[in-house]
Image (spheres, helix red, strand yellow):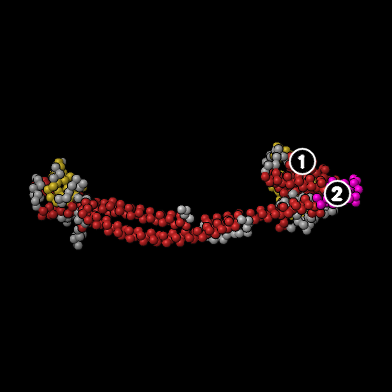
Amino acid sequence: MKFGITAKLFCAILAACALVLVINGVATRIVFERGFLGYLNDQGISRLEHLLPRLQGEYARHGDWEFVRGHPDVWFTLLRPSETEEIDLESRVPPVSDQSGAVFRFALLDAQGRRIAGNPAVAADAIRRPVVVDGRTVGWMAMVPFQRVLAGNEQRFIEEQKQHWWTIGIASVLIAALVALGLSRALLRRVRGLAAATHRLSAGDYTVRIDAGRRDEIGGLARDFNQMADALEHTEQTRRAFMADISHELRTPLAVLRAELEAIQDGIRPMTWTTLAPLQAEVGQLGKLIDDLHDLALTQSGTLAYHRGAMDLAPVLQATLAPMRGRFDAAGLTLKAVALSASLPVYGDERRLQQLLANLLENALRYTDVGGTVAVSAQRIGTRAQVVVEDSAPGVPEDKRARLFERFYRVEASRNRASGGSGLGLAICRNIAQAHEGTLHAEASSLGGLRIVLTLPLLDA
C-alpha cells in the first residue's frame, strides 16, 4: 500500500505531537520526583540538622538515650522549633519542613542503628546524620524519604495522573490531527498545482506559469519553475525561428540553382562561363552558410579548437584590414583606421581572433549605405585591449541592439538580407570573444550607424 504525501505529512506531524506528549509526561514525572520531592527532602534535612545540637546537648546532660526511649512526649518536645529558630514569631507559622510533615518522618537511632524513638518505618534507605558527643558517635538522626511516605498511595496517585494524562494526551492528539490535516492539505494543494504545471510543461505547453504566492520554500520552487518555463519557452521559440531561418536560407540558393540548371537543361540558356558564374556564386553562398553553421555549433558547444598563445593583436588587426580596403573601395565606402595602438599583447588564438575581426568588418561592409564611412580603432583601456568598429547610417534601434548577436537575427527595416550574409557572423564573434574571456557589445555610433566594441584582457596587465 502506497501512502501519498498527504498521509505521510499527516502521520509525521501526528507522530511528532505524540512523541512530544510522551516526552513531556515522562519529563514531568522525573521533574516532580527529583525536583519537588527533592525540595521537600532538602527542607527535612535542613530541619534535621537544626535539631542535632539540641540532641547532642540532651545526650550530654543525661549520659544516654533512656530519657527519650518510650517517652513520645519528650521526643516531640525535642522536635518542636525553638524561639531562636527562623520562624514567624507573631503568627507562629511553623517551618516548611514541619508543614510538609517532615518531623513525623524523623527517627532517633542509637550508635548501632537501632530505633529509639520516632517513625518506625525508618529503613536502610533513610537519610541519616550522626549525633556526635565528645568526638564519639552516640546515635543517628534519620529521616524517611518523602518517596517512601507516598508509597502507600502511589498507585492511586499514578492512576489518577494517568487518567488525566490520557485525557490531555487524546485531546492534544486530536487537535494536532486537525492542525496536521489542514496544514497537509494546504501544502498538498500547492504541490499539486506545481505537479500539474510540470505535467503541462513536459507535454509541451511552455506558456504555463504558477502563482508563487507566499515567500516560502514552495514559493521559491514556483518562481524557479516559472524561470525554467521562461527559458524553455524562449528556447522553443528560438528553435522554431532557427528552423524557419535555416530552411529559408537554404531554399533561396537552391531555388536559384534549380532554376538555372533547368534553364540549361531545356536549352533556354547556353552552358557558358556567363551562365555558370551565378551557379558558382550560389554554391559559394551555400558553402559559406554551412561553414558558418558548423562554426556556430562548435563555438556554442565549446568544442571549437583553440590554439592559444602569447600574441600581439595590433598586427593581426592590420593584417585583417589590408585585404579589406579594396572591397570597401569597390562598395563605395571609406575605411578609416584611427588610434591604432602600436602593441596590444593578448593571450589567444591568432586565427580565431582574425576570423572575429574579419566578421566585424564584413558586417560593417554589408550593412553600411553607399558613400558611408567605417572607422576602426584599437587602444589600451586600463587592463584590457579595446577594438572598436563603427559605421555610418543606417543605425539600429536601441531595443534591438542586444539581439544582433542572436543567430539569424536581422533588423529588416535597415540591414536587410539583400546585403547578403547568413546572419550568423555576429553570433560566432560573440562566442569567440567569450572563449577568450572577452566581451562584445553593440551601441550607437557617433557616425550615425552601429558601434561594436570588443574588449580582451591584456597579457602584460
Give the residue displayed 83% in from the left and 50% down from the top: 258
Question: What's the mark number on residue 261?
Answer: 2
Q: Which residue shows up at 70% across the image and 54% down it? A: 240
Q: As rendered, which of 306 and 201 lies closer to the eye?
A: 201
Q: Residue 339 has which mark?
A: none
Q: Is residue 438 magenta?
A: no
Badge 2 marks a residue whose secondary structure is: helix
Looking at the rendering, the stretch of residues picked out in magenta corresponds to 254-281
The residue shown at (73%, 44%) is 295
Q: CA distance from mark 1 to mark 2?
A: 42 Å
Disc on the earlier residue, 1 or 2: 2
The answer to whether residue 158 of the structure is visible from this angle is: yes
Q: Residues within 10 Å of mark 1 (few under 14, many from 20)?
A: some
Task: Return the x and y of residue 19 as percentages of the image width and height.
Answer: 38, 53
- Picture coordinates of residue 332, whole percent (x, y): 86, 51
Residue 397 vs 127, above or below: the answer is: below
Q: Is residue 144 left or right of residue 32?
A: left
Please state the horizontal and vertical placement of residue 454, each as a whole percent of the image. Answer: 72, 47
The residue shown at (79%, 57%) is 414
| Of the pair 368 and 207, the residue shown nearer to us | 207
Q: Crowding at label 2, few (<14), some or many (≥20) Cα neighbours within 10 Å?
A: some
For residue 112, which quarter of the picture?
top left
Which residue carries the number 1 mark?
A: 316
User: For numbered disc 1, what is the local secondary structure?
Assistant: helix
